[in-house]
Image (cartoon, grey):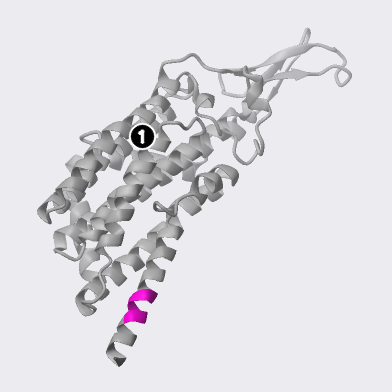
Amino acid sequence: MTSWYKSYYLNFSLLIFSVGFLFKVSAAPFHFWSPDVYDAIPTIVTTFVAIIAKISIFILLLELVYHTNNYLSEFSWIYGLLVSSFLSLIIGTVVGLTQFRIKRLLAYSTISHLGFILLALSVSTQSVESTQAFIFYLIQYSFSNLNVFIILITIGFSLYGYVWNNKEYKNLLDINNSPVQLISQLKGYFYLNPLLSLSLAITIFSFAGIPPLVGFFAKQMVLSAALDNGYIFLSLIAILTSVVGAVYYLNIIKEIFFYSPGHKLKTVDVENTWPFPVKRDLKLNDSNAFSISYDRYTVSSPLSSGYTISSPFSITISIITIVILLFIFMNKEWLSMGTIMVQVLFST
């Protein structure tokens, strides 16, 4: 009687723990807060919420799943994690297709990827390869997510020198902290900054699991581990949702590369402030400085430094993009890193 009493409440406590953790990482069906929060807070804060908090919680979840499955045979996380994985894959993909706000779309994209992470977590205790697949997917997705949000911050900062042709964009809330809120704001950005656009495209294709990018190998490892453990149905659902989810990723690519820019350089009204009351467009001279032309004078201001990507951002974007693009040539190093992390976590 005493043993039943303790076992019952221990299992119930672990169940409450699991619900709280799934809510914290915004896995379905506890995901409802995530899109609204992502969209409402400044982009730099969204970066922290989307990455740092999830990494720490998933590592803790991995430890709990490992120890409870090995030492508490009465309780198993697997069924709850599999249900959450299934719902996350379906909801993240289907609802993501209807989104037109960039950060809400990324929120549902994250929910869909959480389906893969939870699937890997469900089989993580079966073998070292399964745990390696979980850790590798978590690491590569965190870095890819970081790259996307840094690029969005940089794009928003670079567009301060432009005005929107669409008046709708001028009425967006919190435009200073989140300059890029709608997918359509990226329209034609390739013609303004080709390198940054290509970096974003590479990262998005990695999200979609396009070979030979790192996201493809991560999904392959998770699906291989799931199939080895007999989860055929959920593996098929994961493959199907990856294919369908590519649609909303391609929508971003279409806006960036296949439309003309929806921006124009800002104009400066010098009426009542200069001796020559005229209005002229801001232009970029050969030194990438903004210049304002008047009837008799040209006043140049070295504002280019204010619209140049900072060194930490440019270095981070470059390194992550290169790793995503060239992972196929250095996969052994990354996989060995995952093996080392598994050994460190479970050496006891």
Q: Is residue 61 magenta?
A: no
The image position of residue 241, as x and y in percent, is: 28, 38
Name the residue rendered at 49%, 39% in the picture. 104
Q: Is residue 161 visible?
A: yes
Q: Main secondary structure of the magenta part?
A: helix
Q: Which residue is mark 1?
A: 204
The image position of residue 283, as x and y in percent, is: 63, 16
Instruction: Name the side, left or right, on which 3 lies relative to 291.
Output: left
Instruction: Name the side, left or right, on which 278 lies relative to 127.
Output: right
Instruction: Tell which residue pokes out farthest to the front in this image.
Output: 1
**150 vs 15, nearest the viewer:** 15
Name the residue rendered at 14%, 49% in the picture. 224
Which amino acid, mark 1? Answer: Ile
Look at the picture and state if 95 lies above or below 185. below
Quadrant for the N terminus, please.
Answer: bottom left
Name the residue rendered at 79%, 18% in the picture. 269
Label 1 neighbour load within 10 Å: few <14, some 14-19, many 20+: many
Instruction: Name the side, left or right, on which 328 lies relative to 9.
Output: left
**Which residues are drawn in magenta?**
8-13
Name the residue rendered at 78%, 7% in the picture. 295
Dividing the picture into quadrants, the one containing residue 60 is: bottom left
The image position of residue 9, as x and y in percent, is: 37, 81
Q: Secondary structure at mark 1?
A: helix
Instruction: Tell which residue pokes out farthest to the top in this image.
Output: 295
**56 vs 61, nearest the viewer:** 61
Quadrant for the C terminus, please.
Answer: bottom left
Q: Is residue 12 magenta?
A: yes
